[in-house]
Amino acid sequence: MTALLHDSTRLPPFPAIVPEAIGPALDAVIAEHEATVTQLTASRPSRFAEAWLPLERSGTAIDALWSAVSHLQAVADTPELRAAHAAGQARLVEAMMAVQQNRDLHDLYAALAASPDFATLPLADRVAVERAIRDFALSGVALEPEARARFAAISVELSDLSNAFASAVLDATDAWTEHVADAALLAGLSDADIAMFAAAAQARGLDGWVVTLQQPSVTAVLTFAEDRALRERVYTAYGTRASDQGPDAGRFDNGDRIARILALRREAAGLLGFADPVEWSLATKMAPNAGEV
């Protein structure tokens, strides 16, 4: 676990990221973050350095750990790593919602923003505090207890759905292949691309070549393959992954998840007083409204 809690300025220790170490490491950085919140809300510092930097440091430690875990799970997925990532993601969202819905912490930064010295701070410092206050509001900090709890539950469920959605896409990507026995179908592709397809075939115990839906394979075929039918098959399979129109239709279909995600986003937007999820989304973006978009 200790190896996972690395200096965020250094490269992640990917060899140390094993499924059984993820939960304890995440618990450690979350506990440190929660302790920081407790200390801040108890002492209520009034200066930027004391009020902001401790939370930023503990938040950066969480980001450093979880970005490395998430990246590894995306590019070197295993059932064990996927399960550890899903459990950790749910734990992380729940913990972060508790922080973002902490009214005492919100009030600390609101008081900092209202202090006479706030205007003298560097622009980056002022924006950091102002964005934090905005994010508290967008996390439901001002809601009544029942609505606040519902918003937190929605956030956790949306995170679970997002993980399941991504897993279905990953599984659908891995499930599709095309075994090519005729070298003429690969006309136009570079020697390096053909060697990649040959290696994919050898890994499966096959002769010839295997085209997959991994990004290097898709890019090579769609960009350079002269065979129009091959390009069409790869394009269609890639574009319809994890849908009821794609390969293995129904096996990886994300249709029900999409419907549930849309319904939950609309409910969450309504709890926050937005007309719809688009208005909610634009609250953190430059465009002022959907019409402008």
Image (cartoon, grey):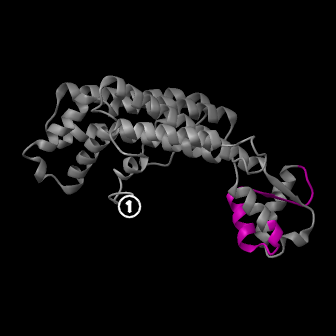
As drawn, 285 above or below 42? below
Taking depth in this image into account, of 93 and 19 the one nearest to the observer is 93
Q: Position of residue 226 (x, y in %)?
A: 80, 75
Quadrant where the image shows the C terminus: bottom left
Give above or below for 143 relative to 166. above
Q: Position of residue 260 (x, y in %)?
A: 56, 37
> Image height check: is 258 above or below 184?
above
Residue to which mark 1 is pinned: 291
| Quarter of the figure with residue 40 | top left
| Side (left or right) of 88 relative to 171 | left
The image shows residue 223 at horizontal and vertical percentages of 71, 72
Membership of 57 in magenta stretch = no
Along the viewing direction, whichever of 60 and 74 lies nearer the viewer: 74
Q: How far across and down, in percent of the image, does residue 118 sit?
A: 12, 47
Looking at the image, which is closer to me, 30 or 18? 30
Query: Residue 55's image quarter?
Result: top left
